[in-house]
Amino acid sequence: MIDINRTIDDVDFQILNILQKKARIPNAEVARQVGMAPSAVLERIRKLEEKGIIEGYEVRLNPVPFGQGLAAFVQVEIDRKSGNGTLEKQLAEVPGVQEVHQVAGEDGYLLKIRAADPKQLGEVIRDKLLTISGVRSSRTQVVLNTVKETRRIEL
């Protein structure tokens, strides 16, 4: 685990905050906002990437035009002996699965799945998810409205 306070300074935190708000911001604008030369800012960003603090840059797409307007969280219960990398890989490969989290409390995982509609979601769960060896059962909660969805880290 990275000891963030030993790894980066206040300027790095400023840069990270700026990039989290708008990853496509020109380097010169980041430099202007933090009061440094563009080359120095670019070097800092490269170091943050090398250290694994910045993992990548993504475009956030609206899921509706792509036929994935329905979101659901699915609690998957597994057989105790089945919690391994193969099962996790199979869960991650189920169509529409965006997130796979191993959770405490019960033997299982929490998945975020996107689908076009309830019918398609049901088909994915019945025909793909529940056919994976080691999956015992599932419980689904369909999202009615998303109030907040972000990957930003508060700094």
Image: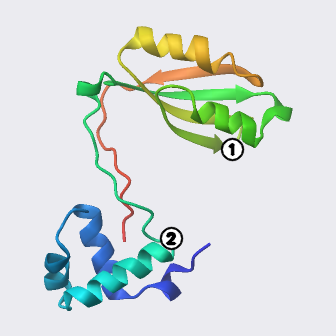
Q: Amino acid at mark 2?
A: Gly
At label 1, the amino acid type is: Ala
Image height check: is 70 above or below 80? Answer: above
Q: Earlier in the sequence, mark 2 or mark 1?
A: 2
Please, which residue is most extreme toward the top here?
119
Residue that label 2 marks: 52
**Callout 1 secondary element:** loop
Q: Nearer the viewer, residue 90 or 77?
A: 90
Residues under labels 2 and 1: Cα distance? 26 Å
Observer-side mark, 2 or 1, equals 2
Image location (x, y in percent) of residue 112: 49, 33
Report which quarter residue 107 is drawn in: top right
Residues packed near mark 2 inside 10 Å, few (<14), some (14 to 19) or many (20 plus): few
Answer with the quarter of the image where residue 47 lies.
Answer: bottom left
The x and y percentages for residue 105 are: 71, 40
In the rendered structure, find residue 104 and report the number of the disc placed on it: 1
Q: Quadrant of residue 145?
A: top left
Image coords of residue 57 (percent x, y): 35, 58
